[in-house]
Image: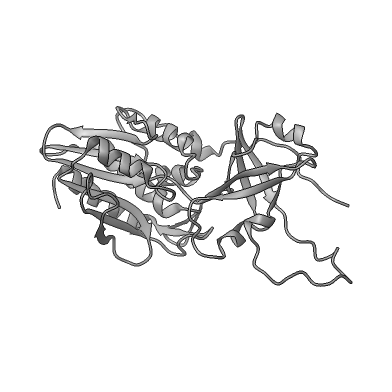
Amino acid sequence: MTFRLRPLLIAVPAVLALRATAQEPPPLDALVLRLAAMTAVSGYEQRATDTLAMLLPGSRRDRAGNLLLTLGDGEPKSLIACPLDEPGYVVGGIRPDGYLTLRRVGRARGPLADQQIEGQRVTVWGRRGAVPGVVGVRSIHLTNGRPPLPDTPFSVDEALVDIGADKAATVASLGIGVLSPVALAKRPVVYADSLLAAPAIGRRAACAALLRAARTTVPARGSVVVAFVVEQLFTQRGLLTVGRNLGPFADALLLDGGPGADRIGSRTSPDPTSLGSFEAWLLPVRYLGSAVETVSLREVAALERGLTFRIRGGE
């Protein structure tokens, strides 16, 4: 007997109902939780930028889909950027029996990255909103007496997603089509003293710290462009568009999550003609790239303080 999921739209978690007033941004812990619950597969970040736009009065979008806010005025002009995107998948095909096949989006973090979705809950984002699903696993009960399957790691090419549909027409009625984004279901977990685990939480927590700092700080002189950039894992199109359209900058800072205990990373440059060399601050992350990627909320608070100092004109 085969059991199938019933079609059901995901209810919005209570944390997503959080509202920010124009005068006071949400508390940092609540904001980190809200961003951790978002899905922003590389190239499909619009829902995430919609949320940030509501939380960041005065912000605007550029032609690449980045969300921008300029603090202060004049020279020197600085840039602080935080990527929003995460690794994920899109619907590659819809079978007549209602199952979905997948294709990977963005660079995978390691050769076994696809194994993290085998047998796991995922969210498919269609035109009508979020739809829950499960990635199927090989049946051990139906293979008794048959030649063993090749002992190879699970890959996206063999993934089948069950969303409770029994035919392709049912899938279409849920607003799901080819190229609808798919990601692990987001269930942020706070544990121990001040640790938070969720997929891609390093990036989301860094962006939460930047949003809070941008809402509460103004430069002592000159201007600071705050940019929440898209497609960093794919082509870096968002960051490069900011550099080419708004540069040159006296200095540029890129935020991200990364392994290790130090926030400050090395200097590098994706496009010397527009950004020059920029500084990278890495929020310390445990289990980077996994479904239980973890940050310390104390470290996030420290990052917010550092960004506040930076925006005011400190180094």
Q: Position of residue 48 (x, y in %)?
A: 45, 37
The quadrant where residue 173 appears: top right
Q: Tell me if residue 200 comes above or below residue 37 in the rendering.
A: below
**Of 162 and 287, the residue lying toward us:** 162
The quadrant where residue 31 appears: top left
- What residue lies at 28% left-to-right and 56% top-to-bottom? 281
**Of 189 and 117, the residue lying toward us:** 117
- What residue lies at 50% left-to-right and 64% top-to-bottom? 110
Q: Is 54 on the left-hand or right-hand side of 123?
A: left
Q: Is 124 on the left-hand or right-hand side of 206?
A: right
- What residue lies at 21% left-to-right and 53% top-to-bottom? 277
What colour-coding does the image apply? one colour
Q: Position of residue 257 (x, y in %)?
A: 37, 56
Q: Is 76 on the left-hand or right-hand side of 238?
A: left
Q: Position of residue 136 (x, y in %)?
A: 72, 54
Q: Is residue 205 visible?
A: yes
**Count of numbered circles on the image:** 0
Q: Position of residue 37 (x, y in %)?
A: 50, 44
Q: Is 197 on the left-hand or right-hand side of 282?
A: right
Q: Is residue 194 visible?
A: no
- What residue lies at 41% left-to-right and 46% top-to-bottom? 32
